[in-house]
Amino acid sequence: MEDIYSAYILSTEHRPDFSTFVEVDEIPVIDLSETSQENLILKIGKACEKWGFFQIINHGISSDLILKVEKEAKKFFELSMEEKNTLKRDVFNAIGYYDAEHTKKAKDWKEVYDFLAKDGVQIPCSDDPHDLELCTQKNHWPQSLPHFREIMEEYGGKLEKLAYKLLELISLSLGLSGDKFLDCFENQLSLTRLNYYPPCPFPELALGVGPHRDPCVLSIVVQDDTGGLQVKKNIIGGWVPIKPIPDAFVVNLGDIFQVWSNDKYESAEHRVVLNSQKERFSYPFFLFPSHHTILKPAEELVSEEVSAKYKAYNFGKYYANRTHADFTIQEVEGIEIHDFKILD
Ligand SMILES: O=C(O)CCC(=O)C(=O)O
Ligand SMILES: [Fe+2]
């Protein structure tokens, strides 16, 4: 194996086993244009409880806009390394181009480009609770692509609105009011990401993204027709592929909904496997609250019979820890929500 590849090689237990795929058709596909709101909420609730994943159709975002995003994303990743490196994110401004994310101590086989829904938002500079310094997060736009910014801002804005609609429906499915969590998003850290996974000569040894749970409220993933996203379901024996469906978007719950729902819903573990022949693109939107948000289970879901399963925690400090973990291969894993778990 050539040296430049060695950083991508996963330890044996994390390598994808292509012989044990579970072919099921069960990831629910939900039609957002369903006229009965009651039925819609019921279907979403069931999908969140069983999978933490579902796909949506008739979401109101045109395939024409997706095509434009796809074209611009391809042009972006074809830019010279020199130009992409001028847009590179760093430990203080974790927004922009990046080609060295790590999961499970191996490098992910991908390049990414992120932009914020709210340019100029602030996050704590460190996870030290006594350090009050804030770092401003800025978008970096490529100068040589004249339509890129306009198309991406339109796309990000539409996905943000769709995320609020899903937030409302998922809140209702928990028996909470539709606007229960809306206050958390005024200075939100939400971002849109472009993911590029080149063909990989050794797909059995590396991953596009290693096994992880999203740290956000929810993610909306628009993927091309290559396939590769998989969700872990232990009860049916392993990794389940999320099949690309034309014009459908994938929705998955993040850690914050798991905490808000007091473990009624799961932030499911997922990963992206690679293809030796075909490249893959995906364009997720991650809904994040503002940094000063205190996260804890919704009080309506806590009672004498059902105790709170998480201690309250500050989102910004948690986010700072996660962001810093992206820049180093750490011996100690970064903070995860189970670190806030109240043990029985
Ligand atoms: O590329 C995808 O389909 C999903 C990537 C992902 O899970 C992530 O960026 O968190
Ligand atoms: Fe993810």
Image (spheres, rainbow, N blue to C red):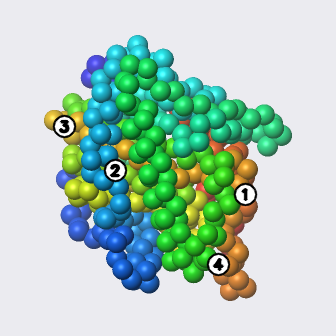
Disc 1 Cβ-to-ligand 2 distance below 8 Å: no
Q: Residues within 10 Å of mark 2 (few under 14, many from 20)?
A: many
Of badges 1 and 2, the one in the foreground is 2
Q: Is residue 14 visible?
A: no
- Ligand 2 under 8 Å from disc 4 Cβ: no
Image-quadrant location for residue 49: bottom left
* In the image, farthest residue toward the bottom: 305
Q: CA distance from mark 1 to mark 2?
A: 29 Å
Q: Which residue is mark 1?
A: 294
Residue 129, placed above or below residue 249: above
User: Disc 3 marks which amino acid?
Assistant: Lys
Q: Residue at x 18, y 37 (%)?
A: 278
Question: First in sequence: mark 2 or mark 3?
Answer: 2
Depicted 209 relative to depicted 30: above or below: above
Residue at point 51%, 77% (across, down): 173
Measured as percent of width and height from the top left, residue 313 is found at 72, 56
Name the residue located 63 percent from the left edge and 63 percent from the top edge.
Answer: 182
Quadrant location of the C terminus in the rendered image: bottom right
Tell me the amino acid under the disc marked 1. Answer: Ile
| CB contact under 8 Å: marks 4 and 3 | no
Res. 196 visible in picture? yes
> Which label sits on residue 222?
2
The residue that label 4 is drawn on is: 301
Q: CA distance from mark 4 to mark 2?
A: 32 Å
Q: Secondary structure at mark 3?
A: loop
Q: Position of residue 85 (x, y in %)?
A: 45, 18
**Gap in Å between the C-alphas at discs 1 and 4?**
17 Å
